[in-house]
Image (cartoon, rainbow, N blue to C red):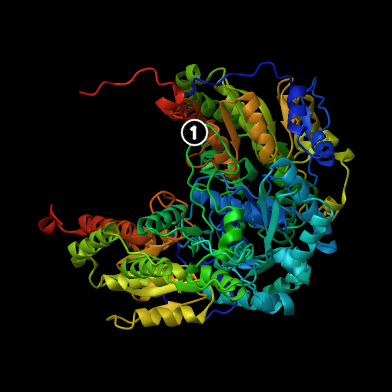
Amino acid sequence: MATTKKKMVQWTPTDIKEELLKKYPPKVARKRAKQILINEANDNEAPEIVANVRTVPGIITMRGCTYAGCKGVILGPTRDLVNITHGPIGCGFYSWLTRRNQTDASAEGAENYMNYCFSTDMHDEDIIFGGEKKLEKAIQEAYDTFHPKSIAIFATCPVGLIGDDIHAVATKMREKFGDCNVFAFSCEGYKGVSQSAGHHIANNQIFKHVVGENDEEKAGEYKINLLGEYNIGGDGFEIDRVLKKCGITNIATFSGNSTYDQFASAHKADLNCVMCHRSINYVADMLETKFGIPWIKVNFIGAKATAKSLRKIAQYFGEKKLIDQVEAVIAEEMPSVEAVRDDVLPRTDGKTAMLFVGGSRAHHYQELFAEIGMSTLSAGYEFAHRDDYEGRQVIPNLKVDADSRNIEELEIEADPERYNPRKPEAELGKLEEAGFKFKHYDGLVTDMDKGTIIIDDLNQYEAEKLVEILKPDIFCAGIKEKFSIQKLGVPMKQLHSYDSGGPYAGFRGAKNFYKEIDRLVNSKIWGYMKAPWQENPELSATYVWE
Amino acid sequence: MLLRHTPKEITERDALVINPAKTCQPIGAMYAALGIHGCLPHSHGSQGCCAYHRSTLTRHYKEPISAATSSFTEGASVFGGQANLIQAINNIFSVYEPEVIAVHTTCLSETIGDDLKQITIKATKDGKIPEGKHVIGASTPSYVGSHVTGFSNMVKSMAMQAEKTGTKNGKVNVIPGWVEPSDMEEIKRLAALVGVDITLFPDTSGVLNGPLSGEYHMFPEGGTTMTELKSTGDAVGTLALGEWCSADAARWLDSTHKVPCKVLDMPFGLSATDRFIDALRIAAGVTVPDEVAHERGQLVDMMSDMHQYFYNKKVALVGDPDQLIAMTEFLVSIDMCPVHIVTGTPGKKFEKRIRELTADMPFEVNVKAAGDMFLLHQWIKNDPVDLIIGNTYCKYIARDEDIPFVRWGFPILDRVGHQYFPTVGYKGGLRLLEKILMALLDRKDRDDPEETFELVL
């Protein structure tokens, strides 16, 4: 462990904010100032932060694009879809197997296209004369070779610019095949301001083209959907294990370890449980409006959070059998979690973390760190909106700017036949009276300590400054940030794809995470930064050689 | 099975690429630009391109990759990206203070017709480029060529910084092509050993294989300086290693500044390294010292010592044209048989060259430019091989087909070593042979029945 770290206690949050902004040209400083918040939250009231706005050109951002959010994040983990990227080769190549989404395709005859990359590899002649013909042919070739149940098309930047009508091509091919659902996503990289726009586009099209396609009854009790869980490092496997043990049936996960049929049957669930609020709350809302399924916010990151979420699900269904089983599972799982925690705690207690990731993870993981006595000095999201920071009550007041306006909002109505409120009004009211909250998310700000610094769309320069000033014991972000932070002698854990390892969700995941953080913050390696002659450069004596 | 849907039967595909053996131009331009000292690569497009390229290069090198983006939104895509780029240039010089910004375009900015040259002139006029600082640029539309083309285009832009003073500087320009930082270091070592003063560009050594010391420098000490690039016009000659990666830049220096050039293969393996050393000697008019012959002899020694394990072993290769040409020649020289060879980069002359190199081999050769790894896998299913050499994505084929696999090329996302240990030159040849032998002999030790399992191999 590095012994040379000194906390610069003389820095106040205001000083730090000033320092972060000092070097920027005035226009950039003004803009960034609104995205850097010194937390003064009290009594569930969060101060306002600016989020989901454009990144300043030239400022090295952590953000990606709409295509990455749509194809990479939401649709990437569905194993039996043939995902064709319509565009030059790069976008398909970079999103090929790079997100650590695990999937279980071990069943006899199971389809799994996740290890493949499909692209129309557009060339200059396709840009000049249009790429629709090539797309049509590519879909045909995919169909002839694989006979998949569904083919999804993803637009890249030039596709929108040259005006290829990918939806018309998809419709034509869907009608031609009859047994293969072909649909498309207009997820050009330049849309929106981050990958968040891609999540929204993905949600819309999946809802429009797949959800509700399969009306077969699904076996099992206490049916839920798990929304916004991507099975990175096997998180979804662990959550499914726990749910199964409790007797809860997971109809569909959006979208870790998922299949086409899960989406198609999602309307058969009786409760939607939202993990990553940012990426998937649109589907939760639409499922409620169209089919009458209520949604709640859950969090399976952290042992206590997992227990709390399970109890919340049990309370919703309200049956003693389930409530008892959930309590039995928690009682069975917790002792071994506590044992690992007790072992790790003396080595992690009092240490500090920074988290800059995602639209939920920077919030959820604070709970895991807290379980091992580590506090979060500073945090923020890469692509979240104000409601993820301040809570959903701000949604009616969100400003719709030009970048949000060009992302389609679906007009959803109650399904004339299949709309079915899962609980009578009175029962829902009773639950709410007992403190049960539907469609509720308080956001990150109120859960953070007073005086902490919350930063939206943190960039490389600010990250380096923050680490220099506050010297956290660990920094969490994504792959692009990993090594510049580690060069400073501070361990860095990726929270998008976890570097390696996992799961970190559920009970087993909590144990894994405690051990992983112990490994990182107490590693001997951080003490090897300087050679002996660098630590003591003065030559005070020499050997006398015989 | 990981690639369970890949059929043995090969059907014609001309619209759908499956499991590409290439990626797009901008990442090559970004990698090349990182080989300029004090340079911040800049991606003129939407921010996803930059994020993807940085992520891939970071995973390959396990090093920080700094690069900026014009962060196009829909508005910029409609009205043009000039305002974004000028704002980016201003912000970059204010905040990160590089010596150089190397801008490359993307499919987005090319499709809408942004003109880098004109935008740079405007930025200069507006006073956004501080005195003594530079903005260079390369046009790298993703829908033309491949990552190799993008690399070549940025290297050509580097050569275009050359200024001719009329006085020769006595140096030889060496353009190494898309090789690893360790390879660039090795080329410099070999040139110094031969006694030739070279200007290597680009040079990512010292940039992408840096130490961990508790300090972070966005612009490490390595890289070819702008001063060195300017003086390439005064060199006595240029050696371009690789037709696809390096020849354009060398030919430009030849035709514009009359710096004579020679295009060689990348110096992987015995013969290509021989030709490189020989060309260096001739260009600089020096005598090759015995140390070089000694290194060469060591490589020949290992080739001879272990020849029985190489002889007639079939190999499948996937990668980039310049690397594959040199590797094919090397494998053939030790009597291995590269039977399936695929590059995603287009160019019929690649296929021709491979056919020439493998003409005397006892087996039929499948070779394809603008091919993909799905096809390679199908070829392997039809005619199995003893070894696969290629990037990390090959591991899905290697596991499904249970074939030994040597990681070599780009990207390598699951192993380390390429940053630090070269595969160019004679020493690099030793490392390649060691890696090949490890893969083959580990497999032999795993598969040999107990009665023939041997201690000494």
Q: Residue A3's spot in the image, x, y percent?
A: 49, 20
Which image quarter holds the C terminus of chain A?
top left
Q: Residue B25's spot in the image, x, y percent?
A: 61, 65
The quadrant where residue A450 appears: top right
Along the horizontal axis of the image, is B109 left or right of A255? right
Q: Residue B104's spot in the image, x, y percent?
A: 67, 60
The quadrant where residue B284 appears: bottom left
Image vertical order of residue A416 relative to residue A158, above or below: above
Residue drawn where x is 38% and y is 51% of the image: B421
Q: Residue furthest front?
A: B167
Q: Residues within 10 Å of mark 1 (few under 14, many from 20)?
A: some
Numbered marks: total: 1
Q: Residue furthest left?
A: B451
Q: Looking at the image, which is closer to me, B110 or A84?
A: B110
Residue drawn where x is 77% and y is 59% of the image: B120
Along the horizontal axis of the image, is B427 left or right of B171? left
Which residue in the protein does label 1 denote? B213
Does residue B118 appear in the picture of this structure? Answer: yes
Q: Residue A545's spot in the image, x, y percent?
A: 24, 24
Q: Looking at the image, which is closer to me, B309 or A114?
A: B309
Q: Looking at the image, which is closer to me, A2 or B196?
A: B196
Q: Amino acid at mark 1?
A: Ser
The numbered mark 1 sits on a residue in which chain? B
The quadrant where residue B449 appears: bottom left
Residue drawn where x is 83% and y is 54% of the image: A409
Secondary structure under the numbered disc 1 in the rendered image: loop
Image vertical order of residue A491 relative to residue A535, above or below: below
Image vertical order of residue B33 relative to residue A485, above or below: below
Residue drawn where x is 61% and y is 54% of the image: B226
